[in-house]
Amino acid sequence: EVDNIVEKGDKFFKISCRDNGCGMLHDEIPNMFGRVLAGSKYGVKQARGKFGLGAKMALIWSKKSTGLPIEITSAHSTNKADAPSKETFCRLDIDVHKNEPKIHIHEKRPNKSGWRGTQVDVIIGGAWSSYRARIMSYMQMLAVITPYARFKFRYVHDVKPKNSFAVEYERRSNVICEPSKEVNYHPKSVDNLIMRQLITRTRKGTKLSTFLTKHLACINKPMANSLVNDLVKITKGKFDADECCKDISDQDLQQLTQLLRETKFPSPRADCLSPAGEYNLHLGILKEYSPQLVATACSKPGVYNGHPFIVETAIALGAPEAKPGITVYRFANRIPLLFEPGSDVVTIVANKRIKWASYMINQKVDKIGVFVSIVSTKIPFKGTGKEYIGEHVEEIRKMVLNTMRQCASQLKKKVAEKRSANQAANRLKSLTKYIPNVSSALMKVVEEMKDAEKESNKRRKLEEKEDEYMLSNAAALEELREIERTLLGGNSVTEKVLVEHLETHVHNSDMAEALETAKKRGRGQASLATFYLVPTKSDQVKMAKPI
């Protein structure tokens, strides 16, 4: 994937985004880009992004800031090896009031370069100097959550070429996420509008019980009949069980929706979700931030208001370019969230709900990176910009807290082992540091002993007697000579020899202590290393086949 920004002036920029996907069909391009909420889905599934508008949002922003249309070039082919002979070029605008595309050019051209994919060009107004850091942070976070893709970002300054630069984010993983599957709406997730849309699409003469079993999840025939009978009782006979569902009134539909919310149903299926996976998340963090330690955890599928969700969390320690303290990286449906971090549930939990000291982590000194990715068929965003997830959803808050604790517990073991190893290294370093001083002091003692022997020999010749001091000094010298004859291979005791033997002794003692510690932990535990294996299809988070 290639992102390209070309500066055209002080306030206007041309943004080009090009991929190497399968492309788009010629006849569908105008509606795909020029019509908002143009869909015919009968079910629900997780989709990447926040608003569900995609490039339409770029078109709307272009119309607002410059009034210029966007250009789409697409070469469609379902066969990777076979490049299409034609490519589609479309220049269009959008009629916001009628919600329909205004087509300027829509034609097929020869595919001279033999490529496959889609390129979108748009000219917008903006302030590059103010938002450069945000854009580059977004690209890096995108590379973390999608390590199976390769990104290239290029900034071209026509006026000042020296300011141009390019950044490439290499792919690290060969495993892509399993695509999400479309499933029926869960009864607790529907509202009056969704119910009316589903009923409108049913065939004439369809009974309400049949509609419930066919278009809603987790409802079998007996439960559907029970719900219809309850609705008849609530409406006091105004609604007939044999009545066509298309004829249901708005008031009765409200009663039905309320009844669905109050009834207990099994949890929805989670195959409508497509999480990144612990494997990819771990590789992405290692690739982009190079921390010393990384721990990952993935929650079981949870449910809130009938919407399934999965929380994936990773905590990294000791990234070289990180700042001391906690840095939070948030993702919603595998899209980075940059703004309003202080109000987000992830930030609140990381800063106020986790007792980092109990996991041997210093919240103010250590470089802590907290990565949390939440995927769901409906992300409970707060605010008009959809830039943060509120703490009001208890189910999501608990999952975020639990996965963070799991990661912190994993890191606690690693931190304890690392701290023990550092203490041993510091102890060895301290002992080694004093070896020259100790050797020098011992050598002075040896020299004094030898000088005393010479002096005693002179006195013996003069006085022909030996006192107690002379005898003790002679015994010490004899022991020294014995050491020289045995341990030192007949060499004399020098300061260099003392240093070598003291260093050997210190290292041997440290090794013996390390082996004793390893025995206490368990046989072979000291040499174990953590390996991260590619998940198989039998695992909870399914992964697709290698590309």
Image (cartoon, rainbow, N blue to C red):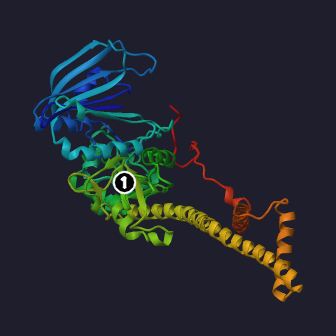
Q: Quadrant of residue 324?
A: bottom left
57 or 377, nearer to the observer: 57
Q: Is residue 39 left or right of residue 362?
A: left
- What residue do we see at 27% from left, 43% from top? 135
Point out the image quarter for the N terminus: top left
The image shows residue 252, relative to residue 154, as above or below, that is: below
74 or 340, nearer to the observer: 340
- What residue do we see at 82% from left, 61% from top? 488
- Residue on which the image places disc 1: 329
Q: Is residue 431 something one can see in this rendering?
A: no
The image shows residue 511, relative to residue 137, as above or below, that is: below
Where's residue 455, x and y in %? Answer: 79, 78
The image shows residue 396, relative to residue 129, as above or below, that is: below
Q: Is residue 391 something one can see in this rendering?
A: yes
411 or 519, nearer to the observer: 519
Work out which residue is located at the far bottom of the displayed protein and give it. 468
Q: Quadrant of residue 482?
A: bottom right
Where's residue 351, x and y in %? Answer: 36, 67
Q: Is residue 464 left or right of residue 361?
A: right
Amino acid type for the residue under numbered disc 1: Tyr
Where's residue 36, x and y in %? Answer: 21, 37
Q: Is residue 271 left or right of residue 335?
A: right
